[in-house]
Image (cartoon, rainbow, N blue to C red):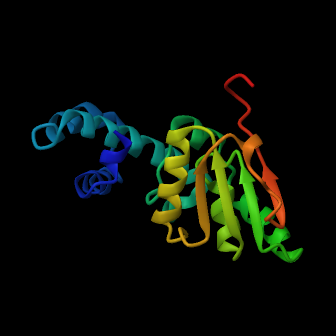
Amino acid sequence: AFAALRTPEGEHLLAELRDHDPAQELATATRLRRTHPAELVSAALGQARLRQRAVAKFGAGDAYRMYFTPNGVEQATRTSVATHRAARFAALGVRSVADLCCGIGGDAIALARAGIAVLAVDRDPLTAEVARANAEALGLADLIEVRCADVTEIDTSPYDAVFVDPARRGGR
């Protein structure tokens, strides 16, 4: 379903749903399912809800271009905090960072916007794909390399710094 959101049809639906009223979701879903596959409509409505929630953390300009998972939007670092951290790294002369447990890429985005090259790593395949999509959506793919991997298997020696902010839910 996530891959379908990144198609032209999926992106069109997401644009159409930008300002939808959640109270009208059933009527909206019924209307959209007349011309789009039901699975795509469901995914787009879910993503639209997540984007609306994400505005508080990322601002409308970024939130409506980014992609989210339910845990990702909940656990993502607010842009103001991520920007502050990135500025501190940049002030120290850091040019490259391994962002381990990157989630949807909130901190990686701020680091890249500060001019720092980022290796963003998450072990969950969907979360890593969302981080990659966010780097692309925000025009930062040239500064953010995303890997789906176990962070304990990453060689961090080529990087000036390591940043780790692991998820605080889900077991370990």
Horizontal and vertical percent position of residue 67: 47, 50
**As drawn, 85 above or below 150:** below
Q: Nearer the viewer, residue 25 or 51?
A: 51
Residue found at x 78% / y 74%: 95
**As drawn, 164 above or below 25:** below
Horizontal and vertical percent position of residue 26: 25, 31
Q: Nearer the viewer, residue 36 or 161?
A: 161
The quadrant of the image that shows the C terminus is top right
Q: Nearer the viewer, residue 90 or 58?
A: 90
Residue found at x 83% / y 60%: 157
Q: Is residue 161 left or right of residue 6?
A: right
Q: Nearer the viewer, residue 21 or 80?
A: 80
Q: Is residue 128 left or right of residue 86?
A: left
Residue found at x 49% / y 48%: 129
Snapshot quadrant of residue 111: bottom right
Q: Is residue 140 left or right of residue 16?
A: right
The quadrant of the image that shows the N terminus is top left
Horizontal and vertical percent position of residue 171: 71, 22
**As drawn, 97 above or below 104:** below
